[in-house]
Amino acid sequence: MFKKMNDKNRKRLHRKIHIRKSVYGTADRPRMTVTRSNKNISVQVINDDEGKTLASISTLEKEFAKIKPNTEGAAQLGEAFGARLKEKKITKVVFDRNGYLYHGVVKALADGTRKAGIEF
C-alpha cells in the first residue's frame, strides 16, 4: 500500500493513522478534519458514530473560489466555516489535522474557526 508513494506522502499517511487512533467524533463533539493541497482547502465535520458528514466547506464552492490556499485565505475560510457550524448548532468539535503539521494553513484555519466561537 505504501510502496508507490513518495516519502513525504508516506510520512503524512503514517501520522494520519496514528492520530486517528485517538481522535474520534461523536454526536456531542464531531470530528473536524482538514484537507489541503496547493490549490484548495476543504474542511468537514463528521459524526463517526453514524458515519455522516454534518457540515463541510471548500474553496471549490463558488462563493469561496477566490480564496487562495494561504494563511489569510485559510483564516477567512475558518471564520466562514465557524458561522456554518453555528447555524447547525454545533459549538464543540474535535480537531483532526489529518496528518498535516499544525502550522501555517492548518493553524490559521483552526484559529479562524475558534475566532468564530467554536471550541476545540
Image (tube, rainbow, N blue to C red):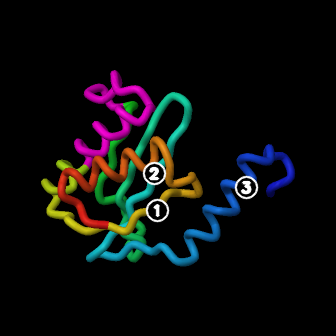
Residue under the point 26% across and 47% down? 81
Q: Quadrant of residue 17?
A: bottom right
Q: Residue furthest top?
A: 66
Residue 16 image point, x, y percent: 61, 62
- Whether tag 1 and tag 2 are in contact, CB under 8 A, the answer is yes
Task: Estimate the spatial distance between the alpha carbons at disc 1 and disc 2, rounded to whole Å.
Answer: 7 Å
Dot 3 amino acid type: Lys
Q: Which residue is mark 2?
A: 34
Position of residue 60 relative to residue 75, above or below, is: above
Residue under the point 75% across and 53% down? 10
Secondary structure under the numbered disc 3 in the rendered image: helix
Which callout, 2 or 3, points at the residue further toward the start of the chain?
3
Decide which of 74, 33 is in the foreground and name it: 74
Which callout, 3 or 1, points at the residue further toward the start of the chain?
3
Position of residue 11 relative to residue 47, above or below, is: above
- Whether tag 3 and tag 1 are in contact, CB under 8 A, the answer is no
Task: Estimate the spatial distance between the alpha carbons at disc 3 and disc 1, rounded to whole Å.
Answer: 16 Å
Task: Estimate the spatial distance between the alpha carbons at disc 2 and disc 3, rounded to whole Å.
Answer: 17 Å
Magenta part, dominant SS: helix
Q: Which residue is mark 1?
A: 96
Q: Which residues are magenta?
A: 61-81
Report the side of 13 relative to 98 (left or right).
Answer: right
Secondary structure under the numbered disc 1 in the rendered image: strand
Residue 63 image point, x, y percent: 26, 27
Which callout, 1 or 2, points at the residue further toward the start of the chain?
2
Q: Say if the magenta span includes residue 74.
A: yes
Dot 1 amino acid type: Asp
Residue under the point 38% across and 33% down? 59
Q: Which residue is mark 3?
A: 11
Q: Residue furthest front?
A: 103
